Each structure stands twice: as C-alpha cells, then as structure tokens.
C-alpha cells in the first residue's frame, strides 16, 4: 500500500489496522539522482539567473495546473525573477500554453518531455520543485510518484496536493505546503520560498533526500516486503 490515507479508508471499512502495512513506492533510482549543477543545461532552458519553480511530469486534468498559472500571474510583478517551468506532455498542455499566451505570462515556460538522461540535471537546477493535483477526495490521499523523485533529487518541494503528500513534505522538513487549486495560497507559498535564505532551502532539499533514503527507497521497500513474507510464512 502506498499511502496512509488508503490505510485509514480500509480501517474505516472494517479492516483491522494490524493487517495493514504501508509501503511507499520508490522512484527510478537508476536515473533520478543528485548531480552537480550544469551551467550548460541552465543556459539551454533559460534557468540561469532566475528563481526556478519546476514541474516535471504528466500535464493532464489530474494535475489541474491552471491554478498554478493563476499563481504565476499573481507573483509576476512583485517577484520578477521567479519563473515557472513545465517539463512534460499531456492533454492539457495546449490549453495551458494558450492561457499563458493570452494572459501574457512571460514567467511561464513550457518544454517538451525530456530524456531520462537529462532529468536529474534539470531537477537539480530547480530552486523549488512543484507537485500539484486537483482538489479531489481521491487525490488528497494519493502520493504522486514525482514526490519520491523530488525528494531523492534533494531539492525543496512546494506540495499542493492534500493531507497525505503535504503531510510527508512537512514531516520531512522538505519544503512548504498549501491547498491545491488555490492560486492565492500557491502564490503566497512561492513568495515564502523566494524569501527563504538559500542555506535554509538547501537544508530542505537535504531533509527530503534523507527522508527518502530512510522511508521510501527501494532497499527500504524490499526489506519491508521480506519481513511481511517471512511473517506470513511463519503463520502457515
């Protein structure tokens, strides 16, 4: 099981708590890893000299990124160095591109999905990594897979999802959180990140990476599965 939210739901439906074990999903550890900042990659994507809020992954209805564009509009005057970069594809890309063009959001940039070999370099250049989902009861107990990748890469996280993902980010000390689909709250959280000293931002990233290694990594999951299988075998 991948979230405490699903555990709560099962308990509500009568499943004994002692029969439920939460094992988090892990990220693609072969391709997602902390790397040194690459100035060539920064220049390629216009990240040099900017405060970069980066979203990487599927851009569909579940991600509900229109609210993030609204937040970009709210901060473009008082945070002129902040820009939002979206890497990925999906059914909402064209609509969001059109909205950004229509509203003259020059602080919003879209890029095609990038090869796995380059993703770590892009994520490592982010000042903040963004995870956002639609404000929906199902999504509020969901942990998007990019959460694990963001933690593993060791950069601060802006989580606007729901109690489960936001709770993990808060518990890890890996960033700041807010309600999803709330442009004002997202904008205020961006300002909060922008005003945070760089050494504190670096510590948030380190906290997230440490939490991933301790709670979410592949080796941790394997160990938990082994213990479950051994316990089940003893009961036979």
Image (tube, grey):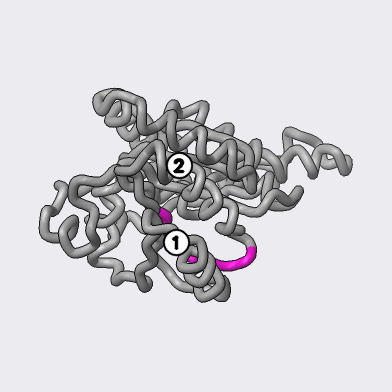
Q: Secondary structure at mark 2?
A: helix
- List x then y, in percent, for residue 76: 42, 45
Q: Position of residue 145 (x, y in %)?
A: 50, 54
Q: Quadrant of residue 163?
A: top right
User: Can you identify the residue that label 1 sits on?
Assistant: 104
Say which of marks 2 and 1 sits in front.
Answer: 1
Can residue 214 be seen in the rendering of this structure?
Answer: no
State the SS at label 1. Answer: loop
Q: State the separation of the CA atoms marked 2 and 1.
A: 13 Å
Reply above or below: 108 against 234: below
Q: Where is residue 178 shown, x and y percent of the image? A: 58, 35
Quarter-of-image position of residue 193 = top left
Badge 1: how crowded within 10 Å, few (<14), some, or many (20+)? few
Q: Is residue 184 left or right of residue 130?
A: right
As drawn, the residue found furthest toward the right would be 14
Residue at left offset 45%, top offset 42%: 75
Chain part drawn in magenta:
54-61
Q: Is residue 142 visible?
A: yes
Question: Of the numbered discs in the image, which one, if any, rests on residue 75?
Answer: 2
Which badge, 2 or 1, comes first in the chain's sequence? 2
Residue in the image at 39% along x and 66% along y: 110
């Amino acid at each position: 099981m991948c979230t405490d939210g699903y555990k709560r739901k099962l308990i509500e439906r009568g499943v004994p708590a002692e029969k439920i074990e939460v094992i988090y999903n892990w990220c693609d550890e072969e391709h997602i890893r902390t790397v040194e900042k690459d100035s060539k990659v920064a220049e390629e994507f216009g990240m040099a000299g900017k405060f970069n809020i980066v979203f990487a992954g599927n851009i569909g209805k579940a991600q509900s990124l229109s609210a993030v564009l609204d937040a970009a509009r709210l901060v473009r005057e008082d945070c002129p160095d902040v820009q939002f970069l979206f890497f990925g594809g999906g059914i909402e890309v064209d609509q969001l591109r059109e909205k950004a063009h229509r509203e003259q959001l020059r602080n919003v940039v879209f890029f095609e999905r990038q090869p796995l070999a380059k993703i770590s370099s892009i994520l490592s250049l982010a000042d903040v990594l963004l995870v956002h989902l639609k404000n929906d009861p199902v999504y509020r107990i969901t942990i998007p897979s990019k959460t694990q990748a963001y933690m593993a890469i060791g950069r601060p996280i802006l989580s606007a999802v729901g109690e489960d993902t936001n709770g993990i980010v808060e518990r890890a000390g890996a960033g700041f959180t807010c309600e999803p689909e709330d442009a004002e709250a997202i904008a205020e959280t961006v300002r909060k990140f922008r005003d945070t000293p760089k050494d504190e931002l670096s510590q948030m990233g380190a906290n997230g990476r440490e939490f991933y290694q301790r709670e979410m990594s592949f080796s941790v999951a394997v160990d938990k599965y082994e213990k479950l299988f051994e316990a089940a075998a003893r009961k036979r």
